[in-house]
Image (cartoon, coloured by chain):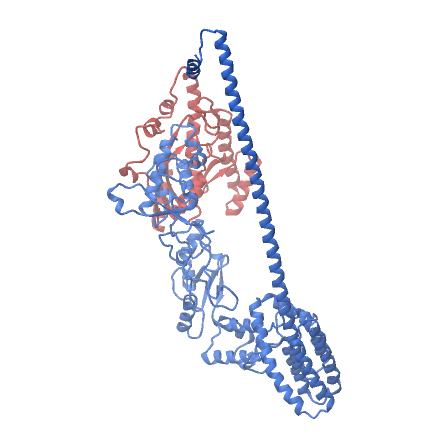
Chain colours: A blue, B red
Amino acid sequence: MAMEASNVKPPVSAIEEAHLDLYTIPSYSSWFQWGNIHEIERISLREFFDGSSITRTPRIYKEYRDFIICKYREEPSGRLTFTELRKSLVGDVSTLHKVFTFLEKWGIINFSGTVSAEPAEVQQRHKKEVRVEEGAPYGVRVVAAPNSLKPVAPLPPPVDVGGGGGGELAENGSKFPPLASYSDIYGELLQQQQQGKEGKELVLCGSCKQQCDSGHYEHTKDEFLLLCKKCFGNGDYGSKSAHDFKYVDDTNQVVWTEAETLLLLESVLKHGDDWELVAQNVKTKSKLDCISKLLQLPFGDLMLGSALRKTKVWDRNAGQAVPAHSVQDTVTGDDQQHEHKNQGQQNANVEDPGPPHKRLCTVPNLDASSSLMKQVGRLSSVVGPPVTACAADAAVAELCYENRCSREIFDDDNFGDELGYSARTDEEERVLPVENSEGEKGPTVSGASEHRGNELQEQTFRKNVVPLTLRMRAATATSLGAAAAHAKLLAAQEEREIEHLLASVIETQLKKLQRKAKYLENLEMIMEKQQDQFGEFEEDIVAERMKVLQEIISAGIPRWKDHTSMKSLTGNVL
Amino acid sequence: MKPLSTWGSSRNPVKFRIPTSDNLLPIRLDIEIDGQRFRDAFTWNPSDPDSEVVVFAKRTVKDLKLPPAFVTQIAQSIQSQLTEFRSYEGQDMYTGERVVPIKLDLRVNHTLIKDQFLWDLNNFESDPEEFARTFCKDMGIEDPEVGPAIAIAIREQLYEIAVQSVASAKESRMIKKGRKGFEHIPISKAGGIAVDLVKSFGNKSSVIRKRKEWDVFEPIVDLLSNEEVDALEATEERNAR
């Protein structure tokens, strides 16, 4: 919860006015004043104000309160503890504690202290046994949006565990640690990589602060509590008991040389997610080791993740591409590679380096049983629209490039007129959807073209597989184009609708305001009329009174005991 | 000037109870059988059925692997302390306005604590456990046994004072006729251990202590080494004999 700090100045004499210390208290405590006791205080600390005891009077309360605040302000950067305080005050400790907690709760004291108000055990443990780190913990990257390296400022304390290390809390009460930069987050990692060149994770013992060599003991409940073997043997484990620790063996840590890392990266680029092949390439390391090493590298999972996201080209209109999918089903390529190629193109996952069979269908949740397009649709909904748009752009560009090749191949190919004809018709129809203003036609056209392509493919299936592939690409490009056009139209429609709705909302609001204004006008009129009426009544009454008085006087009543105004009236009358 | 119901006053004495928010009785055990010594202190809820005493004793012996002869002794000790408490229970407690000094002087494992502070006997919402928790947190004590030990020490002293006030209530009821100024009674009756309220809290004085007195009321927490602990234990045993 963000709190705006407001400043409260303690009472200072004129001499010290030149040098005023600013203390910050939260804005919800701005009711507090030095000279008074506020209602909130009276209610929360009732026992001082109900006269129930001679030991609790408002005067005494004010003395306690002022003393506590002054004591705190002698050292505003530290946290004033109750025990430190109570020795200076005469009174029941429970009552004093109540006053203390009241002031602390309202932030009048201990507001900008750097020590977070955690339960003692947690704080103690962490103070002793945790390395205080700047920024996000090791291996965790705090990002503002996927694929971006810009870290976000973490939430303000009191949840902050590493406490003071998370950031200096400045005097002006700012509770946000500084934005961590890349070097902050990865500085440690880089450092460690430089230090332990094999890339071994540095384990520091909690009590002796030295590196644990072969193995260390980890506390079962708190992974941060680590002890090296030496300390464990010494029995120096603070307040924990011996059987809470379990042994973690480091001796079989994998050691990665630079050459291996290079190999790993290359094979990942080449083979993508196929860890069998990657492991084969990096011959000395198993599959698991490869994966974990890749994740450890700062950009490792970026590579994995971005590739996954790039596979999502189809936007929300996944349905448009269904015909393409059915085409693909009929192709019973005997070479699995080619089928993968097809699938790869269905996914339209192309990256500039590498052949198209990279990034095989190891998409998460990829289920062979469910429709490919459904999965694509699901995944595309996970990713944000700008990413999808970029990916679509890239895919279209790539496919267009390939289409040119396919065109050449088709033209050169002596397949016979059927293929050539169909190729040309494909081209025409490919052009059509792109230029087509109506999105609905597009998919059907492309569907038709693909059907034709389908028949032809069946006939010429065995003859040449390569053109088949390229035809596939052509088909997918067509559907891509259709889908893109449709998407654009939908977007335009959405915008129009939004505008329309907005306009209607504004109109309604205006009408409402107009009605209100009119109503208020009416009310005013009524009030004025009433006022006039009352004025008239007043005059009537005064006139009546005068009449009555006149009658009385004329009736000759001698004594007149009334207020002076009446006397003067009678005087006037007489 | 209506007193709150939680604070007893001289006009309506309260039934005897431990003057804390939860009516828990401090129990201290110190049993020796065949050279083996068992010392413990804990709080007991007097509203628990008495059958629990034996159950508790058995479980303690089992957990700590003591010889079974301890079971009866433990149960007996607890029971007798409970009975004593119950004997006071029906009677009136006269607390008046009392702020008493509580002194802590105890050793728990490696931690030595010396402290003194004031406690309002009338505050039936006071919580020694909370005080102990704050104490340990502020002083950075990590030994988890210290907190409860502090709480029990406080409770014992409160118990003792409460017992005394029962006795004094009986006497004062006889003497009280015509006496005004109830603040003065506790002073004369309780042997002067209560704080002079008028002097401390009256209009002429400040509730802020003089600086030279701060050290007196500051808690002292010492961490002892193993040898010191052994030495102290030896002295205690010698004194006990």
Decide if residue A172 is on the left or right side of residue A464. Answer: left
* Above/below status of A207 relative to A386: above
Extreme residue in the bottom direction? A414
Q: Residue furthest left?
A: A15
Which quadrant, please, contains the N terminus of chain B?
top left
Q: Which residue sits at x=53%, y=26%?
A: A536
Pick the front one: B93 or A485: A485
Looking at the image, which is closer to me, B80 or A99? A99
When asked about the image quadrant of residue A397, the answer is: bottom right
Identify which residue, A67 or A504, lies in the foreground: A504
A317 to the left or right of B97: right
Q: How many marks?
A: 0
Is residue A278 visible from the viewing direction of this image? yes
Q: Nearer the viewer, residue A353 or A282?
A: A353
Q: Is residue B207 above or below residue A6?
A: above
Q: Is residue A149 above or below residue B56?
A: below
Residue A537: image quadrant is: top right
* Residue A265 versus residue A513 in the image, above or below: below
Residue A161: percent from the left, percent from the top?
45, 56
Position of the C terminus of chain B, as image quadrant, is: top left
Q: Position of residue A466 (x, y in %)?
A: 66, 87
Say if residue B235 shows up in the picture. no
Q: Position of residue A37 (x, y in %)?
A: 39, 35
Position in image of residue B133 (x %, y %): 43, 44
